[in-house]
Image: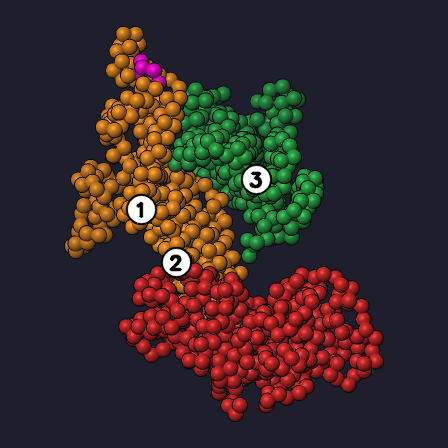
Chain colours: A orange, B green, C red
Amino acid sequence: MGILRYTVYRLIQAVPVLFGLSVITFLLANSMPGDPVSIMLAETESDPELVAALEAQYGLDRPLHERYVNYMIGLAQGDLGYSLYYNEPVLTKVAERLPVTIMLVASSFVFAIATAIPLGVIAAKNRNQPSDHASRIVALIGVSTPSFWIGLMLIIIFAYQLGLLPSSGMVYPWHSPDDYRFIDSYLGIGSTQVGGITLPWLEGLYYETARHLILPTLALGTLHMATIMRIERSSMIESLHADYVQLARAYGVSERKIMRKHAFRVSQLPIVTIIGLNLTTALGGAVLIEEVFAINGMGRLIITAIQNLDYQLVLGTTLFFGVVFIIGVIITDISYAYIDPRVSYEEDS
Amino acid sequence: MAHADPDTQADVEQEPVDDEFEAKVGLSYTLAKVKQDTTARLGMYIVGAVIFLAAFVTIDSNISTLTFGRIDNFVFAENVLGNHPERHPPAAEAETTLPPFFADGGVLSHPLGTDIYGRDYFTRLIYGSQVSVTVGIVATGIGLIGGTIVGAVSGYYGGWIDDVFMRTVEILYSIPALVLVIVFTVFVSGGRPDIQYAVIGVGIAFIPVFARLIRSRVLSVREMDYIEAARASGVRDRNIILRHVIPNSFAPVLVLATLQIGVTILIVAGLSFLGYGAQPPTADWGQMLSSARGFMLPSPWLSIWPGLAILVTIMGFNLLGDGLQDALDPRIKD
Amino acid sequence: MTDEPILTVENLKTQFFTEQGVVRAVDGISFDVYPGEIVGLVGESGAGKSVATSSVMRLVDNPGEIVGGEITYKNKTLVGFERAGDELVPRDEMLTNEEMRTQVRGNEIAIIFQDPMESLNPVYTIGHQLKEFILLNRELDKKAAREEAITMLREVGIPEPEERFDDYPHEFSGGMRQRVLIAMALACQPELIIADEPTTALDVTVEGQILELVKELQEEYGTSFLWVTHDMGVVAEICDRVNVMYLGEIVEQATVDELFYETQHPYTNALLNSIPRPDQTIEELVPIKGVMPEAINPPSGCRFHTRCPDAREVCTEIEPTYSEITTYDGWPHNASCLKHEDVGYDVSEPIENEARKGIEGTEVVQ
């Protein structure tokens, strides 16, 4: 089976999981206390007729299973429901927030992988030497520190004390620079002139995005850096002692090439798996990090939804978290199959 | 092989005794090993110190409650619970805070300074250990007991029970634990979240973690000859699980539970920080970080200490867990 | 034979410095390999055979270290020491690690490991791995290397080598993988191939095929082999001369015929009695009793005395010298046993040991 067919196969396999996910999120969201309609009407005098009319309009007077069926029919037509709090369709809200969270999670994984793999390899190479011990201490601290606290510390140091980076907010690269024109702190955006020279990369929208991303990325990525580093170290140590690496040495392959090729590639396999598994942790972490840095992503959306008992929004956001995770796992499975020839596409992974 | 039968028979009778024996030997052996290992010992000291503080604080507050009837009357109450706005008119201004003793304006009587209500931060930090330790142990306990039951049943009976369990776990894994617990907390508390709901929620969310481990142990033990023989000779299923599987799983469960306490404390700190865990005026590290957020510019130390406390506590459990793992499974030691 | 040996090992000592103490894994062994010969290195697991071969390649892993002796390959000094004050230090002419890598490993001495399942990198095609080693050890361009690889695969009996070239190791059976590894060794055109129990992990029919293949290829290419094994049957099948190792020492060395028919050392005898022999009809196989002691604290006197059926009092006290007993067809027959020395073995009392008490140890010889 080729990689394409394997992809299709994995997607089909995901269907029952997605179905189960929809049931569980539906039950979860419906288990929330409070009555959406009375929350919507809020302070106003509750008029029984108005309540009944609204309940009928949103189908809330129907029994649970019927509401589920209706929800699924809506879902099939691309209708995720309606957010009473934002007074907007859930899909609109999700479409607006999801890219932000994906950008944050992706950049933190890029940071984690880019730092953890070299550090893990160095630690494995210098096993039981000072650099190895140092990297193990860093990894230990990394897995023991709450990400949101790292965020707070980064804000204190880099935003408040040193004034180098912004403490909150986000600049979206897909927006127009004009969107930020009236915000004082973002005056730099869009002006591509520095000392009369045009420097689009230094002073433009992307530059601002990068500046805003650095601290949240570090805060969210540290845990994953630590986890990946630990695994990279042990899997590299293992493959450095493998017979095929000994064989390569016996055939005169240089240590440098052994580190970069013979031992390295095999030791990446567990990393791919762990990245897939850590995706939910990262999405959960994004909830906290978005809160700390006041970034309007999915995490904050879900918190707002829960706070306001906006159950359709809770449903939609939770469901999307699940979908993002499932897609992520499928991507890691496919990349695993791609880099490890031993994975048979025929078999159930 | 016909002649092997007497051996198998002998195994059936001896095995339960052997298991218990091994489990006991395992424990003392483990402790001895852990004592030899520097990092594990460090972990043991940290965990021991935090548990001691938590116990001390609990006894102290119980005594003061008994002595003075109401907790508010005692000096500690002033320090720990203080003039919370729910009790007294707010005096919440950044100027009322004191910095740590080594900074300008700090005093030794408040070594880590005071918070915005003038409460001694060091005392509150110490009291925070109570919440963390209780949270870690209780939530992990819920996960452990629930997971053992679910995992044992699922692994032992297999079939559709196992299928349903595994699929449910797979689906639950796709939603971040933090989100699940928040929804659960809001649901159970009827919109008024508090620490006890968070603990139960985290405990339930971690049932699958333990259930998976127990299930895999059950699956591997189930295939063994002596279990077949025990079943053939009419030993009841429940007894097989209780006498063979559970003692056999002692070591990996102990390691997982130790590491899981750290994870639990981490998640509950996050919940409290978001406002879905401990509520003011409880002295809880996550909650303290949440309260300190508005004062990061004028009083950064308010954000530093509770985080360090969480870091050290979780690091203690991680060190201990790693040390136990090394001690119990020499294969992966390096 | 008038040729010079291509490999000479003299008094080689390799030790492992562990927390429990110094393990004398190889404790002063000497042997040589002449061009075109297959020399066996036989012994139980733990006798130090593999440490000896990795010492020849200078690939002893930490905490192991070659602490003494001489290894000469043709005119190159692979290992050589000289005295500087109280210490032995490497001599100037001893090859550096870099020289070992570029001048010896692969192109002069190649190796085949025991476990074909673990010896090939799972994430590269066998063609890629073959080609890489050929490019590294021979002056060929990429296209020629590929052709050479395919030729060698055909030589070792891989059907349809052009197609199999791009297959991954997991798509080959154990026997086929061992053939690939043999092709790999031959393709680099070394003069000596160290085969470290290459057939142990294979089943008996495949083992037979591989041994046949090696014999054919050896005649065709004239390559010398140092063949490490614990199996006297394999020795009989393939070797010209044999070295028997016990606990870090070589206890007997002779041509195959001499060793089998004029056995001089009780250990060799015990090894031979523990396997079925086509040339003799015996009632019962006799396993070697007891377990080989730890190399960390070897027994005094003769190291084999704890398990030797012929052991006497004197064996516990005096260390036998490894010396020439006879010569056969120009080849020496060496052994180290007090039976052949004038130290009062005949008048000494037999001792109680594992062999006599009949303690069933692990049956170390299959």
Between disc 1 and disc 2, the foreground one is 2
Q: Residue furthest bottom?
A: C2
Q: In this view, does C304 lie to the left or right of C125?
A: right
Q: Which residue lies furthest to the front in this view?
A: C281
Mark 3 — residue? B222
Q: Residues within 10 Å of mark 3 (few under 14, many from 20)?
A: some
Amino acid type, label 1: Tyr
x, y percent for residue C296: 67, 68
Q: In this view, does B159 lie above or below B329?
A: above
Q: Residue at x 28, y 21 (%)?
A: A70
Labelled disc at residue A6 = 1
x, y percent for residue B169: 44, 34
Q: Residue at x 63, y 19 (%)?
A: B69
Majority secondary structure of magenta residues: loop
SS under mark 1:
helix
Amino acid type, label 2: Glu
Task: Determine if residue C24 is in view.
Answer: no
Highlighted magenta segment, given as a residue range: A60-64
Task: Mark 2 and mark 3 in contact? Answer it, CB < 8 Å.
Answer: no
The answer to whether dots 2 and 3 both sit on one chain is no
Mark 2 — residue? C171
SS under mark 3:
helix
Q: Distance between the residues labelled 2 and 3?
A: 33 Å
Q: Is residue C269 left or right of residue B261?
A: right
Front residue of C105/A278: it is C105
Chain containing mark 2: C
Front residue of B18/A142: it is B18
Q: Which residue is drawn at 68% across and 86% down?
A: C325
Q: In this view, does B147 lie above or below C269?
A: above
Q: How far apart are marks 3 and 1 (CA)?
A: 34 Å
